[in-house]
Image (cartoon, rainbow, N blue to C red):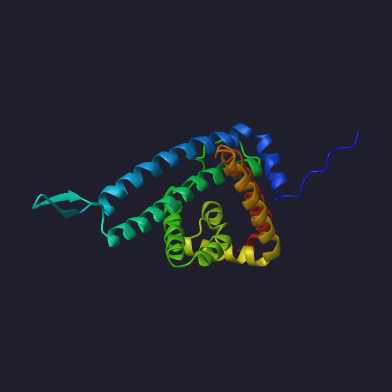
Amino acid sequence: MTQTEAPPAGSLRAGWRALVGSPDRVLVPTLVLGTVGIAVHVVLQHLIGIAVAGSRDCGRQYLGETLRIPCGPSDQRAQLALVVAIFALVLVGHLVVAGIYRAGLDVVDGNEPGSAFNRSLPWPRVLGASAVLATLLTVSTVFLVLPVLVLGFFARYALLFVIEQGQSPFAALASSCKLVAADLVGELGFVLRAAAALLLGALLLGVGLYVVVPVVLLAQVQRFRVATADSWLY
């Protein structure tokens, strides 16, 4: 009987194979972190709506009298609330991804089962890196769509450099850009395939993302491991 050939490391097929090989070690953190992340995001958006957007009173004439009624935030406060909301969304998303990355690294490296919450995950440093990335991505989003796509493409490995090598946020960002630039065509092809898979997962009422996201992240962890095999380069 011919043995099935293993898919190339860093491909979506390899990510799927790693997920199927240890579903409990990746899917459980994804479900927990994803659900908590969604709940935190909803609460934050509600608080932003109250504290940042707020409301103002408007005068309305009725039977010769001026009535003061709430008519929503001013344009400036609404715009500020939108920017803060985008920042919060990206920040929470990066923290969730960091936890899944930790679980994925354990699976890819063959480590003993551990928790995404406490196994070698430097949360203060991760939080700082996530805040920096969220700020840069939010600013890029406010101005144009293209800059945020370019930044997101080159910054995809920054959290892995923070988690694995303890790099500072800006050093990790530089290392991520260097890694992507070293195999620009390959990375672009991977991102396009990953985007198609994520779109398919989103079309499945969003539930498919709980499977597609860890597959993509596992594949990305494998690509990180292959690219950083010569660690002196980063």
Q: Please give the name of the residue rendered at 29% of the width and 62% of the height, measured from the top-left corner.
A: 76
Question: Residue 38 is drawn in which quadrant?
Answer: top left
User: Which quadrant would the C terminus be assigned to in this image?
Assistant: bottom right
Q: Is residue 102 above or below residue 192?
A: above
Indicate left or right for 76 with 199 as reference.
left
Residue 232, percent across and down? 63, 63
Residue 26, percent across and down? 59, 37
Residue reaching furthest front? 63
Indicate left or right for 29 with 59 as reference.
right
Residue reaching furthest right? 1
Q: Please give the name of the residue rendered at 49% of the width and 40% of the height, measured from the top-left corner.
A: 34
Residue reaching furthest left? 64
Residue 116, percent across and down? 51, 40
Q: Please give the name of the residue rendered at 54% of the width and 43% of the height, measured from the top-left corner.
A: 100
Question: Residue 176 is drawn in which quadrant?
Answer: bottom right
Q: Does residue 214 appear anywhere in the picture?
A: no
Residue reaching furthest top? 24
Q: Nearer the viewer, residue 38 or 60?
A: 60
Q: Does residue 194 appear anywhere in the picture?
A: yes
Q: Is residue 21 above or below residue 44?
A: above
Indicate left or right for 85 with 14 as reference.
left
Q: Is residue 74 above or below residue 9?
A: below
Q: How many marks?
A: 0
Q: Nearer the viewer, residue 215 or 45?
A: 45
User: Which quadrant would the N terminus be assigned to in this image?
Assistant: top right
